[in-house]
Each structure stands twice: as structure tokens, then as C-alpha cells.
């Protein structure tokens, strides 16, 4: 049976791979984007002939009013929400002593408050239907920490703690909540690295390669499926053997 899935920050990178996995599996995906209109429309065009369907919903997930509108529009159109993937995230890297308050707060507003806003907005519906899955995108940085990423690491570590707590709240209502923590994945960000930087990163990874967005997407889709029906409150590392 086709499910209704919301994917935040789904217009490119890992988010787009997650959208493809669900749509190609026959699901209806509401892809949230904030500014990347062209990328979202290109993804919609790419998947237009797929088994499932992709619809676009522009919203700034750091703003509760935008999130409320997105969830209400989804319920009005499809009458249910089966899966929420809190994928949207940003980086504003820099050493703490040089980090502005704005760079700290913006990362927290999107990476952590955005997860709060979206999860809170779907919880009442999922509780009433006695089913649902929430999957939160954390990061290896939120587990091990990384110099120059105090804001990002704090936000992603917060996502893991949030996941554990919400899983306990929602389990009695048949709703599962899990997180995934990707390591170094082949995206635009890694593509911009110098060859020397890539070699340094690769030397620390036991599998000696970067992960692909599709490998992350397959884990997200697994966690959303009945095959993961007894998994909640967990964080799955997708890191090639790190840390």
C-alpha cells in the first residue's frame, strides 16, 4: 500500500536520494525545500514517470507557522502521514572563538529546532492513527565531535538525544522514532574538497571509501519499513567503520 512520506530538505544530496528511494518504491513523497526551487522542480521532473509520485512543499522548517502549513496541506491532500524524514540541515563551520552568535543560532534553528517543529506537527496525527515512523538525520559529528563544528556537532548530538526521548513517548501509540548518523558521504560538500583533504579523510575510514547518498537512503527506507518494526530509539551509523 502506498504511504505518504514527508522528507525535509529533500531537493538535493542525501535528501533527494531518500525521495527517489520512496517514490521508486511506490510511495507518495512530499518533498520540503526552502530555497532550492530549481533543484526541487528538477527532481519532480526526473521522477514524474516513477511508480510513486513527488509533490513539492516550500517551507522554512525553522518557522513553526511554515511547518504547520506544510503538514496541514499534506493532510488535506492525502488524509494521512505515514513517515516523516527530518533530513534538512545546514553547516556554518568555524572555530568556536571565531564563531558568531548568528552562525551558532542558525544551525540550531534548522538542525535541531527544525526537527522539533516537524516532529511536533505530525505527532498528534500519528498518535490518532496509531501508527507512523519518524526518522531523524543526525551525523557522525554528533557522536564523535569535530573541530570547527561545535555548533553542528551540538545540534546533531541533540538530535540523537531528542530521538531517544521521543521514541519513549511515542512507542505506546505504535509510532517508531529512530535516527541515522552518516559519516562522510559523496555530496556537493565532499566534491568541493581538495585531493589532499580527500586522501586524509579516506585514510581514517576502515572501508577506504566515501559512502553514497543511496546507501543512506536505503537505511532510511529500511527503518521506515515493517522489517524494522521492533527498532525504536536507535541511531544507526552509516560510516564505513568510523568512528
Image: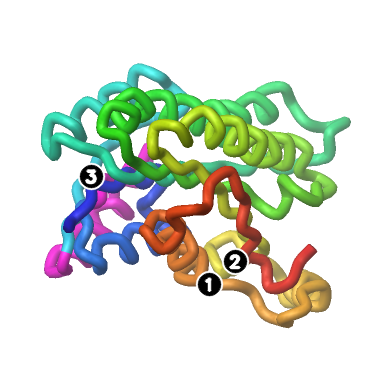
Mark nearer the N terminus (1 vs 3): 3
Q: Are marks 2 and 1 in contact (CB under 8 Å)?
A: yes
Measured Cα–Cα span from mark 1 to mark 3: 24 Å
Mark nearer the N terminus (3 vs 2): 3
Q: Residue at x 70, y 39 (%)?
A: 157
Tag count in the figure? 3
Q: Label 1 belongs to which residue?
A: 212
Q: Magenta residues, as a range?
A: 29-51
Q: Is residue 87 above or below residue 69?
A: below
x, y (%) of residue 98? 83, 32
Q: Label 2 belongs to which residue?
A: 185
Q: Secondary structure at mark 2?
A: loop
- As rendered, which of 94 and 60 lies closer to the eye? 60
**Can you say which quadrant of the picture contains the N terminus?**
bottom left
Outermost residue on the top side: it is 65
Q: Quadrant of residue 84?
A: top left
Is residue 162 shown left or right of residue 50?
right
Q: Secondary structure at mark 3?
A: strand
Measured Cα–Cα span from mark 3 to mark 2: 25 Å
Mark nearer the N terminus (2 vs 1): 2
Residue 107 in view here: no
Is residue 102 shown left or right of residue 204?
left
Q: Residue at x 45, y 43 (%)?
A: 176
- As rendered, which of 242 and 175 lies closer to the eye? 175
**Can you say which quadrant of the picture contains the C terminus?**
bottom right
Crowding at dot 3, Cα within 10 Å, few <14 / some 14-19 / many 20+, comes out as: some
Q: Residue at x 62, y 51 (%)?
A: 235
Outermost residue on the right side: it is 97
Q: Quadrant of residue 57?
A: top left
Mark seen at residue 87: none
Amino acid at each position: 500500500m502506498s504511504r505518504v512520506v514527508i522528507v525535509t530538505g529533500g531537493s538535493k544530496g542525501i535528501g533527494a536520494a531518500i525521495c527517489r528511494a520512496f517514490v521508486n518504491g511506490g510511495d507518495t513523497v512530499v518533498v520540503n525545500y526552502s530555497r532550492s526551487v530549481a533543484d526541487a522542480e528538477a527532481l519532480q521532473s526526473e521522477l514524474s514517470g516513477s511508480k510513486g509520485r513527488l509533490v513539492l512543499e516550500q517551507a522554512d522548517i525553522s518557522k513553526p507557522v511554515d511547518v504547520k502549513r506544510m503538514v496541514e496541506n499534506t493532510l488535506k491532500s492525502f488524509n494521512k502521514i505515514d513517515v516523516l524524514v527530518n533530513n534538512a540541515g545546514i553547516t556554518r563551520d568555524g572555530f568556536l572563538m571565531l564563531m558568531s552568535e548568528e552562525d551558532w543560532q542558525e544551525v540550531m534553528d534548522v538542525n535541531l529546532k527544525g526537527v522539533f517543529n516537524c516532529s511536533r506537527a505530525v505527532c498528534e496525527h500519528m498518535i490518532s492513527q496509531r501508527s507512523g515512523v519518524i526518522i531523524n538525520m543526525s551525523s557522525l559529528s554528533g557522536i564523535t565531535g569535530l573541530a570547527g563544528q561545535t555548533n553542528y556537532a551540538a545540534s546533531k548530538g541533540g538530535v540523537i538525544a531528542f530521538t531517544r526521548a521521543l521514541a519513549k513517548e511515542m512507542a505506546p501509540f505504535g509510532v517508531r522514532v529512530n535516527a541515522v548518523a552518516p559519516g562522510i558521504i559523496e555530496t556537493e560538500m565532499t566534491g568541493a574538497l581538495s585531493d589532499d583533504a580527500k586522501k586524509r579523510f579516506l585514510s581514517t575510514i576502515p572501508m577506504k571509501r566515501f559512502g553514497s547518498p543511496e546507501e543512506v537512503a536505503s537505511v532510511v527506507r529500511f527503518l521506515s519499513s515493517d522489517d524494522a518494526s521492533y527498532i525504536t530509539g536507535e541511531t544507526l551509523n552509516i560510516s564505513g567503520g568510523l568512528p
